[in-house]
Image (tube, rainbow, N blue to C red):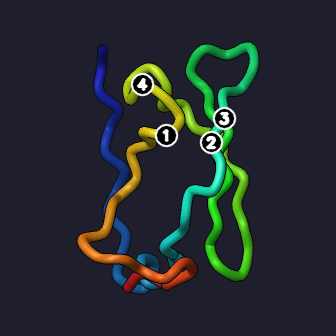
């Protein structure tokens, strides 16, 4: 396996434009056909995201998605940063 090249760094202004939010994983399901895909529903407070993720083989199932887990509860929709 050849590792992917690192992307160039971005400046702080570009980073601060990213809208990072805490979300709650509401639903996770296998996608019929492909052996690696999961369909996830993520609640971000004022809206929800539908996400496809290729995490099945590495993590063992849709409920073990590799998302960050906070040390204490964070309200859904909280903006990071």
Crowd rating for badge 2 (residues with CA inside 10 Å; few <14, some 14–19, many 20+) = many
Secondary structure of residue under mark 1: helix
Secondary structure of residue under mark 2: strand
Residue 65: x and y in percent read 45, 42
Task: Name the residue beneath numbered marker 1.
Answer: 63
- Contact check, label 2 and label 3, Cβ < 8 Å: yes
Label whose residue precedes the other's in the sequence (3 or 1): 3
Label whose residue precedes the other's in the sequence (2 or 1): 2
- Contact check, label 2 and label 1, Cβ < 8 Å: yes
Residue 28: x and y in percent read 62, 42
Label at residue 60: 4
Q: Nearer the viewer, residue 14 or 22?
A: 22
Secondary structure of residue under mark 4: loop
In the shown orientation, is residue 75 left or right of residue 52?
A: left
Q: Is residue 52 above or below residue 15?
A: above
Task: Name the residue beneath numbered marker 3.
Answer: 29
Residue 61: x and y in percent read 48, 28
Q: Is residue 57 above or below residue 48?
A: above
Crowd rating for badge 4 (residues with CA inside 10 Å; few <14, some 14–19, many 20+) = few
Please identify the quadrant where the N terminus is shown: top left
Label whose residue precedes the other's in the sequence (2 or 4): 2
């Amino acid at each position: 396996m050849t590792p992917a090249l690192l992307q160039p760094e971005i400046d702080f202004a570009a980073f601060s434009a990213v809208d990072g939010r805490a979300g709650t994983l509401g639903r996770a399901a296998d996608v019929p056909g492909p052996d690696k895909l999961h369909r996830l529903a993520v609640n971000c407070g004022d809206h929800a995201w539908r996400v496809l993720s290729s995490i099945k083989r590495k993590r063992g199932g849709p409920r073990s998605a590799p998302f960050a887990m906070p040390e204490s509860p964070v309200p859904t929709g909280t903006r990071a940063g």
